Image (cartoon, rainbow, N blue to C red):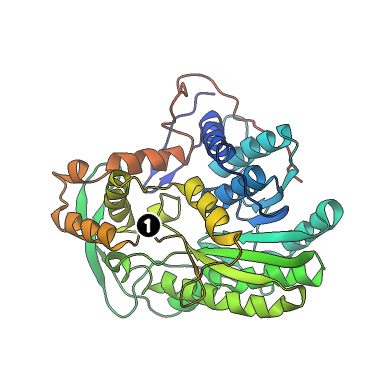
Amino acid sequence: MIITPRTRGFICLTAHPTGCAKEVERQINYVNAKEKIDGPKNVLVIGSSTGFGLASRITAAFGSHASTIGVYLEKPPKEGRPASPGWYNTAAFEEKAQQQGLYAKSINGDAFSTEIKSQTVELIKQDLGKIDLVIYSLASPVRQHPETGERFRSVLKPIGQTFKNKTVDFHTGEISQVHIEPAEGDDIENTVTVMGGDDWKRWMSALHKANVLSENVMTVAYSYIGPDLTQPIYRDGTIGKAKEDLEHTASEITTSISDVKGKAYVSVNKALVTQASSAIPVIPLYISLLYKIMKEKNIHEGCIEQMYRMFKERLYVDEIPLDDKGRIRIDDWEMRADVQQEVEQLWEQATTENIYEISDLKGYHTDFFNLFGFEVEEIDYDKEVNEMVAIPGLQ
C-alpha cells in the first residue's frame, strides 16, 4: 500500500515501515562508527520501541555487543492498515541485530501487567540466565493497576495556579497563549501512579525474586528537569511530582538489590522530540529555540547521540558522576548558562511572524515526522510498501 501521514494534533495516526527502518539504520550506523563501549552483556529494555528506550537498546547492542530483550506495547499491522511506528522500529532493529549475530528478542504487551513481567522473566531464564542492565523507559499516559485492575490516567497540569505562557503549533507555526487550569482532586496521585516509580520497583522486585539479576547489575530510569521556562507546567506540575517519585524510588531499589551489589539510577536527559514531549504545551516552542542554539554551537544531540554519550561517559566509567541528588546528568549541554540565556532571549522575541527565522521549528517538524517514518531522506513515499512487516524476535 501507499502510506501517507495522517495527523491529529500532536499524534500521527500512520507509520511508514521503510522510513522507520531507515531511521533505525541511521542510529545503528552512528553507533557502529563510534568507539566501542566496555558495557553491558545482557540487557532488558522496558519501553524499547521508540525514543530513549530504542536508542538505549541500539547503543547496548551495537555499542557493546549486548544481547537484548525489549518489552513494548505496539499495534501490529493489518492488511491495509500500517502498524504503529514502534512495531516497525523493533522489526528493523531485530533484523539488523540478528544479521550481525546479536541476540535480540522481544515481548509485545502491557509492561505494567504481572503477566508480561512473568513472561519476561521466563525468557531471561531460558535464553540469557541473568541480566546486568535494566533500562526503564516507559511513557504511557494510562496504567491499569496489576492487582486491583483499576485504570489510572496521568494529567499534565500545574499545581496551585493556572499556567499561562506561549506555545506553538508546530504544524502551522502559529504562536498562541495556552491556559491550563491547576490540578484538582486525584490528579497528582493518579499521575504519580502512572508515571512514578511504582512499576519500575515492581519490575526490579520480580527480576530479583526470580534470581535473574547478575552481580553488580545496574538499572536506569529516565527523567527530565528542564529550564525555568517550563518549570510551572513540567517540573513543578503533576508530571514533576511523578518524576520526584521516580527519583526517590531509585534509592529504594538500590537498597532492595544490595545483596547482588546492584545500583539504581535516574538519568536526567535532554529535551528531545518524542511522542510524549510533543504532547506538552510550551515544550515544542522551547525545543525549537533550543535546537537552533545548540546546533549553532555544535552541541546538539538526538536520542541516539544522547544515549551513546550516557553509556560511554556516564554509566560505564570507573566512577559514575552524580549530582547532589544522586542523579546522572546528561542534560548538561542543554542546561549550560549560555544556552539557556539565549533561549530566554529568543523566547521573548518569538511571534508567529518570525518563528521560522529565530528558531529551528522546521527541524522540530522534521524530527516529529521522522518518529513515524515520514520525511526521511532517500525514501520514495509514492512507492508501494508492504505494511505487513514481522518482528523477527517477537515471542
Q: Is residue 272 left or right of residue 139?
A: left
SS at circle 1: loop
- The residue drawn where x is 80% and y is 72% is 209
In the figure, 18 relative to 188: above or below? above
Please state the horizontal and vertical placement of residue 356, each as a whole percent of the image. Answer: 21, 41
Task: Evaluate whether residue 388 shows in this view.
Answer: yes
Q: Is residue 374 above or below residue 258?
A: above
The residue shown at (30%, 47%) is 297
Say which of 259 and 247 sits in front.
Answer: 259
Extreme residue in the front direction: 318
- Residue toward you, 59 or 313: 313
Q: Is residue 390 visible?
A: no
Of 297 and 340, which appears nearest the observer? Answer: 297
Residue 361 percent location from the top left of the image: 28, 43
Q: Indicate the position of residue 134 as horizontal and vertical percent values.
A: 66, 61
Q: Quadrant of residue 149?
A: bottom right
Where 317 sits versus 172, above or below? below
Identify residue for label 1: 333
